[in-house]
Amino acid sequence: MLRVEDLPKAERTSDAVFLEADARDRRVSEPEPEPRSEEGTKKWIDRMRYFLEVDPEGCWVAADGDEIVGFAISQNRGRVWYLATYGVLPGHQGRGIGKRLIDATLAHAGDRAGLFSSTVHPGATRRYRLAGFSLYPQMRMVGTVDRATLPAITGLDEGGEGDFGWMDELDERRRGAGHGPDHKYLLDNNRLVVSRRRGYVYIDGSGRPALLAAEDRETAEKLLWESLASSPGETLVNCITTANEWAVDVGLAARLDIGQEGYLALRGMPEPAPYLASGQFL
């Protein structure tokens, strides 16, 4: 299992895994991927420390001597399990390490419904499908918002801890369980905008919706427009499945570019909608 003292080594392994994946999947028009920044490193370690505090039995690493060569960080929230991040160093793939890590997290999940965002790596996607997950292709929208396209938005407010109760009830209707303690972590690190009892969105510093859930399409579109309006430059909307094509419509209207991005893996639950997950808080 992962320990607090393992976090710096696990972060370096994570950076190497995803740098290689980004280089492999990079489109010709995109810049060369770069290693995680110092700020990104700190955020990753802080986030994994949080997961360890809340649900340590879902956090696993694989070691070869003193080197961490793989990791799988999962969490149980009520009736739902999610995989926050997972990877194996390229030089150690094909040896069964990934399977053992995933098996450990699925044992922790028990009979809960599950979800996570997956890359297109063929070995990984095969493993997920064999574990009983349905794979739903995801899209992403990226670019700089054309501010001339921004509509006038009304009916939204700044949110706070007092909103967590109805937000968890909405989460249950969208994904089968509330986010529970994740809401406090997300609020501490993002701006929260709400349409009270109708929907919410956490917005990061780049105007990216870190997590969005709504009762209906109209509310979801308002929340996404508010997120895009707060972007200071290039932004990203990702984890978009076909059940959430309303997000594609908003992104295209804002003059963002559309592309493909891995899969949303689901087991024991339908596609959440209207709903936009983040990679690590689903």
Image (cartoon, rainbow, N blue to C red):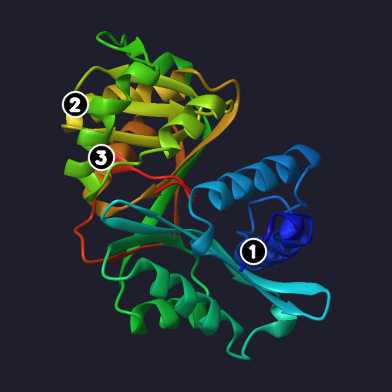
**SS of the residue under disc 1:** loop
Q: Position of residue 182 (x, y in %)?
A: 44, 39
Residue 116 visible (yes or no):
yes
Residue at image x 26%, y 27%?
165
Which mark is nearer the camera, 1 or 2?
A: 1
List the residue tagged with mark 3: 171
Question: Which residue type does callout 2 highlight?
Answer: Glu
List the residue tagged with mark 1: 2
Q: Nearer the viewer, residue 217 or 54?
A: 54
Determine whether 107 is above or below 205 in the image: below
Q: Residue furthest right?
A: 66
**SS of the residue under disc 2:** helix
Left or right: residue 223 compared with residue 96: left
List the residue tagged with mark 2: 218
Q: Upstream in the sequence, badge 2 or badge 3?
A: 3
Report how many numbered discs are placed on residues in the image.
3
Q: Upstream in the sequence, badge 1 or badge 2?
A: 1
Q: Position of residue 54 (x, y in %)?
A: 50, 47
Q: Residues within 10 Å of mark 3 (few under 14, many from 20)?
A: many
Q: Position of residue 120 (x, y in %)?
A: 49, 70
Q: Nearer the viewer, residue 274 or 228?
A: 274
**Whole-number angstrom distance, CA of label 1 to CA of label 2:** 42 Å
Residue at image x 25%, y 47%?
177
**SS of the residue under disc 3:** helix
Left or right: residue 122 compared with residue 3: left
Q: Residues within 10 Å of mark 2 (few under 14, many from 20)?
A: few
**Whole-number angstrom distance, CA of label 3 to CA of label 1:** 28 Å
Residue at image x 76%, y 57%?
5
**Hey, which quadrant is residue 161 in on the image?**
top left
Determine whether 213 is above or below 279 in the image: above
Determine whether 236 is above or below 2 in the image: above
Residue at image x 26%, y 53%?
242
